[in-house]
Amino acid sequence: MTDHVRVRFAPSPTGPLHIGGVRTALFNYLFAKKHNGTFILRIEDTDQNRYVEGAEKYMIDALNWCAISFDEGPGKNEKFGPYRQSERKHLYRDYAEQLIASGNAYYAFDTAESLEHYRKDHESKGKTFIYNWHNRKLLLNSVSLSKEETQKKIDNGDDYVIRFKSPKNETLHLTDMVRGDITIDTNILDDKVLFKSDGMPTYHLANIVDDHLMEISHVIRGEEWLPSLALHYQLYDAFGWDKPQFAHLPLLLKPTGKGKLSKRDGDKLGFPVFPLEWKDPQSGDISRGYREDGYFADALVNFLAFLGWNPGTEQELFSMEELTQAFELDRVHKSGARFDPDKIKWYNHHYMQMQNDDELAEAFKNNQPELKDIDVNYVSLAVGMIKERATYISDFWDLSSFLFEPPKSYDEKSFTKIMNNDARELMSELAQIISHSSDFTVDNIQTDVKTWIGKKDVSFGKVMQPLRLALVGAMQGPDVFEIMFMIGKAETVQRIENLVQTL
């Protein structure tokens, strides 16, 4: 085992990358970078029946969008490559045969039909069928058959799998960096299949062999792999290899109720569970993604980091560099982390305030047809005025349309409450005051209007409310003097006159 920290994220290309997978990749990445180590992407595509075209590219695109870039992986710095298990399949049979030679594994010729018969027979008696030490001598395998009979079946081309020979009457002592010490009675373990009849390894064998050959120092993965830890420990011992350290991350739980977060929860409650939009190559169905829904990658990463981990301080907003410095596995929780769709909105709102106005303006302009001919510098000024009330770029138009075009209508409730003959006279006179304003800056407009209000001896609200209604069409928006400056003198006067004419 190397002293250098080497971790891997090893997804299966069976569909889009779930948000829980992104969290696992993030924790591996943060741990590697904290310890000046190496973060590896390995594609575990041994299950060819479930392989989905385009899933691998999707995973790489998703990790890149989140700035969780791998140091080694498919097509990148392949010194321990190849990094797709389907391209490494020539390696695994030799290792499976090694386990047979050492007495730690055996050939099993049982058909799927015979195993199903045993399962149903056990179920009818209220029992669970487990293929292990207590019945392996009664089944069709190289433990119950002679060497000659076994070889004859192999020579005849009979289908077989290779199973691990789980020991009897032993206690395994396992260590997990999140969960501490774990003890397992080997009598309850089944003899897992390591090598399938189609010539491909199962996850268990390929995973252990690849981790060893790639010199993985720490295996950081989801809690769903915790039941496999006993077998993986035994495989390392059977090969005589040093073990990596293991850490199993807590599950991501539904926002409400019990159980693991699923796509169904997102569909039901209206939030994505994938980082990027995914189009199913077979059905054509489209699943929402955080990127397309208007979330910043930094906000998503910050949110995910706090699902099952915290820094032990009050700080909630972290850059990737700050997360890297703060991250330690001993602050990862054992219990599941509840997914809160409102919290990620909170993060996105805060990250919105950190964004560059010019970059936001470009994105806004590209997404809004009405802005096609508007100068991007003006759009940038508009964004700076309204972004503190926005969560997504898609909110910008509703918050700022009055900066680009006059209101098409007026809020009915506000209009009824505010507009009367007094308001009409005040607005008509205000239009004259503004049209004669010499230097149309925010400060000068404010001075001229407030001076006039003082002379008229009317309340501030009696002028400012109808003025806002004229400019915006509703009782919302930023400072009215800033709005007037932005749209200009002539447009301001025109909008006031439009309101007056409506009466």
Image (cartoon, helix red, strand yellow):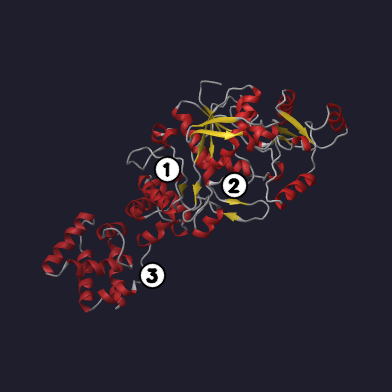
Taking the image as drawn, is residue 481 in sight? yes
> Helix or strand or loop: what does disc 1 sit on?
loop
Q: Nearer the viewer, mark 1 or mark 3?
A: 1
Which mark is on residue 306?
1
Q: Nearer the viewer, mark 2 or mark 3?
A: 2
- At x 38%, y 39%, the residue is 318
Quadrant in which the C terminus is drawn: bottom left
**For marks 1 and 3 on the same chain, the one whose residue lies earlier in the sequence:** 1
242 vs 111: above or below: above
Residue nearest the viewer, comparing 285 with 244:
244
Residue 16 image label = 2
Judged left or right of residue 120, residue 463 is left
Q: Earlier in the sequence, mark 2 or mark 1?
A: 2
Q: Residue 427, percent across and down?
A: 23, 71
**Residue neighbourhood size for the residue with mark 1, other residues' Cα within 10 Å, grouped as few (<14), some (14–19), many (≥20):** some
Give the image quarter of residue 214: top right
In the picture, the disc for residue 408 is 3
Given residues 226 and 318, the one toward you in this image is 226
Could you tell me which quadrant the N terminus lies in? top right
**Residue 328 quadrant:** top left
Spatial CA span between label 2 and label 1: 22 Å
Residue 462 or 103: which is nearer the viewer? 103
Amino acid under label 3? Lys
Three-letter code for the amino acid on which mark 2 is drawn: Pro
> How far is mark 2 from mark 3, CA to CA?
43 Å
